[in-house]
Amino acid sequence: MILALVMAIFFSIFSTATMMYIAMATPIGPWIAPTIALSIIVLARMICVRISASNIALVTAAGSIGGILATAIGFSFPTLYFLDAQLFSAWLARPLFFSCTLSLLSLAAGLFGFWIADLFEESLIDEKKLPFPIGQLVARLILAEDQLKQGVYLLVGFFSVTIFSVLQDGIGLIKGIIPKSITVLNSYSWGYFLVPTLSFELWPMLWAIGFITGHVIALPLGVGALGRYVLAEPINRMFFPALSSSSFLFAFCSGLVVVNALLSMTKVPKQLYSLFRSSSGYAAPSSTVVRCMQMLSNHKRRLVVALFLMFFLGLTLTYFNFSPLVQLYLISFTAICTYQIIIIAGKIGLAQLGRFATFVMIPALLLFAVDGVQAVCIATFVEIAGGVATDILFGRKMGRMVHNDRTLMRIFQLLGLVISALTAGIIFWLLVNHFQLGSAELFAQRAQARQLLMQVQQFNGIILLIGALFGLLLKYVKINPMLVLGGLLMPLNLSVGLIMGGALAWFVRNKEQYYPFWSGVFAAQSVWMLVSALIQTFR
């Protein structure tokens, strides 16, 4: 058990570091639980220790929470930099303040998500029998007969990319000998069209993320990259020559973001209405609240925990200068949206964090006139709470399938949450202090999209309309506008790397068997980036 506790702490930090980098470097946040499970199996074999399926599940459930918490932070919190770079830099210059502030927000939102998951665990898993597919996937992986073979694939991917990174970046006396990229085509103009410089990015993590996500990311990114050079930039040169390319592109993308946000938000009330009807037996929505109160009153321990949690949330939100009314609004709507995020993820395995974060943030901006820092904190709070609650229930589902003790599972998950929240601020500071936000290494596309949405009133109305029409067209042909946005905004070489990985998956007959290898690849590169940041910081 001591070994399991040590491994839980290690993998909580590992998953937080890995996913923090991936969430800011790419627009995708893959679930890290399968990678953790395989890593535990490999590590146990390497140190010649037998570890039971039950303990593998405990460590995986604890460690994976850091992955979703880091993903939520990486998607939302960098928005502050794009809104107010001067303020963000002032915070960054105070490492202890910066790290503690972000960790405090992470811990408060994470504990809230943990409490919601705990409250509805029996209802969703035992009564409604939601599948929680990621939990089932990891449980089958832990119980599989060929787990050692998959572990070897992961190990090969991890160490091969680690060696590649050393040869590319150099370390100590070893000088880098592998170039970062290879230029394939130089740029040239043809009328109103500009053919950009095309380079082949030697960045294995891009190929790995592209391979794992496959067609989900390859097609939209390709459409976005093509749309930029065939549609957006020619319109800029023909009709808005006074505007720089970046100014036009931001306005165009803002229109796309706005229409996507509006269409997404129109679905949320319907989803919430369905939630109330299903959870209250088609009775009045207020009966859902009554049922929650009954659950709390019937369990004194839960009531005491709830009171302490609300007190802690009140102190935390007061620290961020939220008024009591805004605190009540944020806690109430986060609880409602978190439950809906769980329902959707429990059915399809995807946590739709951004949609619900926007749904809570926009009314707060309009109704309470919150400032930019508070708006970013609201979005981050909702994403963390929803993500953590979902991951908690994935772990609980996995635990049931491998016959874990429920109390022990809760203890390990709580440990994982606390460790991840406390280290998230430090890891985030290290990454953004070493790599420039908005650069190729930390492009933070999701955060840029939210910044465009919050500052939409500053852009040209006609360009916004053109972008909105493009967004409507994408919705009509069922292509994800937010991934297309990545192709529009990201440097072409990054998009090409992700597209290449996705295209490679199309030509593989059984791509699932190669997931462990590519999981090792993106884990190795993420850890290498963090190690590079540490070396640079303390040199």
Image (cartoon, rainbow, N blue to C red):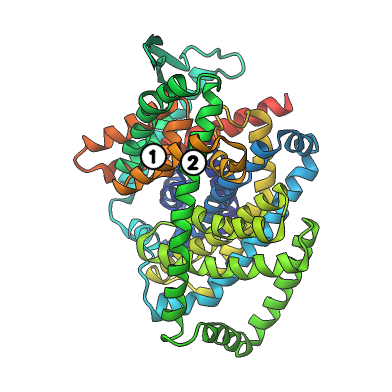
Q: Secondary structure at mark 2?
A: helix
Question: Residue 530 appears at what percent x and percent y?
Answer: 60, 34
Question: Residue 34 appears at what percent x and percent y?
Answer: 41, 51
**Marks 1 and 2, how far apart in space?**
8 Å
Q: Is there any visible trace of residue 437 in the rendered image?
A: yes
Q: Please say if 231 is above or below 53.
A: above
Q: Please say if 492 is above or below 508.
A: above
Q: Quadrant of residue 407?
A: bottom right
Residue located at (53% from left, 66% from top): 337
Query: Is 89 placed left or right of 66 in the picture?
Result: right
Q: Assign the C terminus to one quadrant of the image.
A: top right
10 Å crowding of disc 1: few (<14), some (14-19), many (20+): many
Query: Is 66 placed left or right of 139 in the picture?
Result: right
Q: Quadrant of residue 320?
A: bottom right
In the picture of the structure, the residue carrying the numbered disc 1 is: 470
Front one among 42 and 125:
125
Residue located at (35% from left, 61% from top): 348
